[in-house]
Amino acid sequence: MNEDNYDRLMTWLTNQALDYKIGVEFFHGKPKFAAKAVPKYELVIINLNWRRPSEIPFMFAHELGHLLNHDDGWRYNESPTLHWQSEAHANRTGIQILWRYCQANDLALSPAQFCSTFGVPEAFLTAVVSVLRPTVKFNP
């Protein structure tokens, strides 16, 4: 994704957050700190210095997903099952957010292109297919 498209996407994601009354804080931290949702403050914190910059758009959408799903932020301490359910739900919501960006910008992407464009790890390709399948016709 070129710089202009990246900036347009990050602006769109920020506006989506603000539409839901979610605050956004960008910072340049250590490359190992990815992003965080802070439910208490309805805030997402995004590290623009993440070690894999291509993943930042999906991380942003994923963290928005946690807040839109009303995750309380404490599932990590409850049980591994609840933790992974919460993460999977945030992944799916993040993918849905990015899909809305595609629709708003007339982007026709295959699931693999979607993953590549937005920094969605290939391990989540099945989740991408499940979100895109009802609305997109593609050759598997």
Image (cartoon, rainbow, N blue to C red):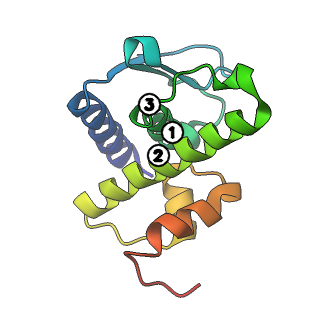
Residue 77 location (% of width, % of height): 73, 19
Q: In front: 4, or 117?
A: 117
The residue that disc 1 covers is 62
Q: Is residue 117 left or right of residue 13?
A: right
Vertical arrangement, residue 139 with respect to residue 43, above or below: below
Which sits in the foreground, 54 or 123?
Answer: 123
Disc 3 marks which amino acid? His
Res. 116 in view: yes
Residue at which label 2 appears: 94
Residue highlighted by disc 3: 70
3 relative position to 133: left or right: left
Category of crowding for the residue at label 3, using alpha-carbon neighbours closer than 10 angstroms: few (below 14), some (14–19), many (at least 20):
few
Residue located 59% across and 61% down the image:
127
Which mark's residue is nearer the viewer, 3 or 2? 3
List x then y, in percent, for residue 76: 69, 24
| 3D distance between C-alphas at marks 3 and 2 | 13 Å
Please name the amino acid that badge 1 sits on. His
Give left or right: position of 117 versus 101: right
| Marks 1 and 2 close (CB-CB < 8 Å) | yes
